[in-house]
Amino acid sequence: MTSTGSLYSLNRTLPQDPRRSRMPDLGTEQNDFGAILAAVSGDPAQSRSTDGKSATSAVSTAPQAPEYIGTRRLTDVDRAIYADIQRTFQLPQPAPGELTILSDKPLMPWMLSGASGKAITGDLLTSNLDKATDIFRRHFGSWMSREGVATTPPIQLSVASDGRVVTQADHPDKARIESFINDNEELRNLFMGITSTKSMIEIGRESAAFQARYAVDPKAAVAEYSHFFTGSYTYETILSIGNTDWSLVSTPHWSIA
C-alpha cells in the first residue's frame, strides 16, 4: 500500500446550516462530528503521552490470522498484528481475496469500530485511536527492546509521500527502524491509520470551531479561518518515542501542489 500526501484534506466550501450539539471532551459547544467528517475528503497540538515502560510481548501467530492476504504472504509480525486488531475491535474475518482489514478503505475499519449507525463521535475516534496505538506500541516496542534500539535522540516516526514510514535523518538506528516497519506491511498500515486518524481528529476540532464561529458571524469566521480556503490545508502527525513516553503530535500543514 502506498499513498501520496495526506489521507485527509478539508473540503473548502462554506457551511450553510451548521448543526449544533455537544461534543464530549472538547470543552465547548461543537458541531456534530459526523457532519465535520463529511467536510473531510479522502485524498491522502495535542500530544498523547503514556508511560514508556510497557510490557514487551513475543510475536505470536493466532488461528484467525491468515497466512496470505491476496497474493501477499504475511510475516509473523503481520499475523500477530492482524489477530490483535481483530480481537481488540471485534472485526469480522474478511472474505478470501480481500486485500487487508487495515487499509482497503479510506477509513480503516478499526477507526469506526463501535459506531452506531452513522453516528461518529470525537470520543469514538479517540478511543479507537488509543487502542490502535497500544497495539502498535506493543509490537514495535517489543522489537525495540529485543534489538536495543536507541531512544536518544527520541525516534520521530512519520509517513512519507510515497507511503513509507520514516524517521528523522540523524537517528543512529534509522535504517533498522524503517526496514522493520516497512518490511512488515500490516505494521506499516497500522501506523498510517493511526497518524491519519489523529490528523483527522485535529481537523475535526478546528472545523468545529470554525463552524461554531460561522454560525455567529460568518464574515469574521471566514477571516479568522482563511487558511481553510487557501491551498490544501491539513494536519501532519508524527509519533515521538523517547525514554519515558510515546506521544502523537499533530501540527497544521499546507500542501503545495
Image: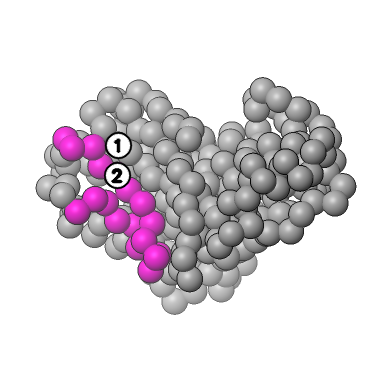
The image position of residue 92, as x and y in percent, is: 64, 53
Q: Quadrant of the N terminus?
A: bottom left
What residue is rendered at 82% in x and 35% in y? 216
What residue is rendered at 39% in x and 26% in y? 50
CB under 8 Å between callouts 1 and 2? yes
Looking at the image, can residue 106 be seen?
A: no
The image position of residue 3, as x and y in percent, is: 46, 67
Amino acid of disc 1: Ile
In the image, farthest residue toward the bottom? 71
Q: Quadrant of residue 55?
A: top left
Q: Upstream in the sequence, badge 1 or badge 2?
A: 2
Q: Secondary structure at mark 2?
A: strand
Q: Is residue 207 left or right of residue 70?
A: right
Label 1 packing within 10 angstroms: few (<14), some (14-19), many (20+): many
Note whether 226 is above or below 161 in the view shown.
Answer: above
What residue is rendered at 76% in x and 45% in y? 219
Q: Nearer the viewer, residue 107 or 253?
A: 253
The image position of residue 177, as x and y in percent, is: 23, 52
User: Does the magenta-highlighted stretch encompass residue 167?
Assistant: yes
Q: Secondary structure at mark 1?
A: strand
The image position of residue 127, as x and y in percent, is: 59, 34
Amino acid of disc 2: Gln
Q: Nearer the viewer, residue 193 or 56?
A: 193
State the residue position of label 2: 156
Q: Which mark is residue 241?
A: 1
Q: Is residue 94 left or right of residue 3?
A: right
- Which residues are the magenta region? 152-169
Label 2 packing within 10 angstroms: few (<14), some (14-19), many (20+): many
